[in-house]
Amino acid sequence: MSADIDLIVSMAEKALRIASQAGADEVEVFGLSGRGVHVDIQMNKIDLAREGYILGLGIKAVVNGAVGFSSTNDPDRLSKAAQSAVSSAKVRDSDPDWHGLPPASGYTTVAGIHDVRVAQMDIDTCIDLSLEMVDGAASVEGAIPTGGRFSCSGSSYVILNSNGVEMLEHTSRINGMLECRAGEGSEMSTAYEFDISRNLDIDFYHIGKEAARKATASVGGVKTVTGETEILFKPDAIGDILESTILPSLSAENVQKGRSALIGKLGSKIGAPGLDLIDDALLEGGIGSARSDGEGTPSRTNHIIEDGVLGTYLYDTYTAGKDSVESTGNGVRNNYAQTTTIDVRNLLVQYPASDVVGDTRRGVQVGSVIGAHTANPISGDFSVEARNSFVVEDGEVKKPIRSMMVSGNVFQLLHNITGAGRDARCLGNIITPTIRVSGLTVVG
């Protein structure tokens, strides 16, 4: 891996030099080197295990306020890629809102984001861990694995720009997911479980066992009554809803383009008292943690909502320049071949914890949802199918629910939060507990 790191750093330095010599006023280079293993599971067997490598860089060139971009994974085409980025910028119109690339800055080291055991894990070990999920499912009578996946990766990336930014980071990531079914015919139910981490600290046997437990517990569901009721959204469910509704409205780009319901809402009450949404890019072991964002802006902790009040939008360098504010460090890259987009790094959903099940006289518990991606990201309206749901009566989780839809508006949801559990879990870039909400409609 060290040879690949040296190569990608050397390529980035060369690209920066060539683009500058070709006439760019500013240059940014993002270089990525990585290795990953992916395992597919079909039923209770390994279907495919494959190892892959990635090495490439993206080049952003700025000429008279116009931005051009090019990428390559071929060291022999590096010069052409750098020149192409400059040529692209030269034929574009100047952007009056361009205020420059990030300046050089110091960085805070983040702990727990690189585990060499994960980054260098061999295929045989990956297969063994995948089969642990299958073994976990087999420990629950009546459940059958239907499919799943496992992946682990290690990567190193470098960010250089003509303002003196020099940032090198090493990361790792491992995750597993298994889906199971139980019952037959109209009584059949399905469920899944997963876990994700930067480090080798996942119990893969538990993933399989929990997927099987959820599936068997959901067999023989009853109908529920249509109407308003208290809903206890488990972490998977509330995480999916928030990702497809509130998060797009927090993007400064969407605010500036009129595509957000939160325009002009800074300093306004948009959630229940006690509700905090914190984006912490310095969180130890966080999936979105690193010393900087994808542009080289130092990572930080942003209090998006504090005690129900909207405190900030999420900015990258460009949108921050338009509003004459500092970037919040939310320029995120998915790969070297694309420029940054605005997204959360590690979103922590926090509300005073309690025994939300025990405190609920009557309601429903929703394990996961389907269809959150169809929500209206501007209005916040959503309608989702609830899965692995249960009736809650007198402080106890009771009978499973056969089929149920939940509809509402995310901004109404934020105002109507009445409780949170002590079961916060990492879903990727969102960390949230169970959230109890009133005033939403369920359709049986």
Image (cartoon, grey):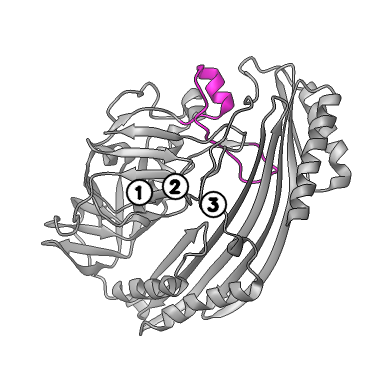
Residue 413 is inside the magenta segment: no
Q: Nearer the viewer, residue 384 or 399?
A: 399
Q: Which quadrant is the N terminus positioned in?
A: bottom right
* Real-space CA distance between mark 2 and mark 3, rounded to the nearest whole angstrom: 32 Å
> Mark 1, residues whose alpha carbon is within 10 Å: few (<14), some, or many (≥20)?
many
Which residue is under mark 1?
Answer: 383
- Majority secondary structure of the magenta segment? loop
Labelled pair 2, 3 in contact (Cβ < 8 Å): no
**Whether residue 444 can be seen here:** no
N-terminal label among 1 and 3:
3
The kind of residue on which mark 1 rests is Ser
Which residue is under mark 3?
Answer: 113
Q: Which residues are magenta?
A: 314-339
* Real-space CA distance between mark 1 and mark 3, rounded to the nearest whole angstrom: 36 Å
- Label for residue 107? none
Q: Secondary structure at mark 1?
A: strand
* Real-space CA distance between mark 2 and mark 1, rounded to the nearest whole angstrom: 8 Å
Q: Position of residue 367 (x, y in %)?
A: 32, 61
Labelled pair 1, 3 in contact (Cβ < 8 Å): no
Residue 334 is inside the magenta segment: yes
- Label for residue 374? 2
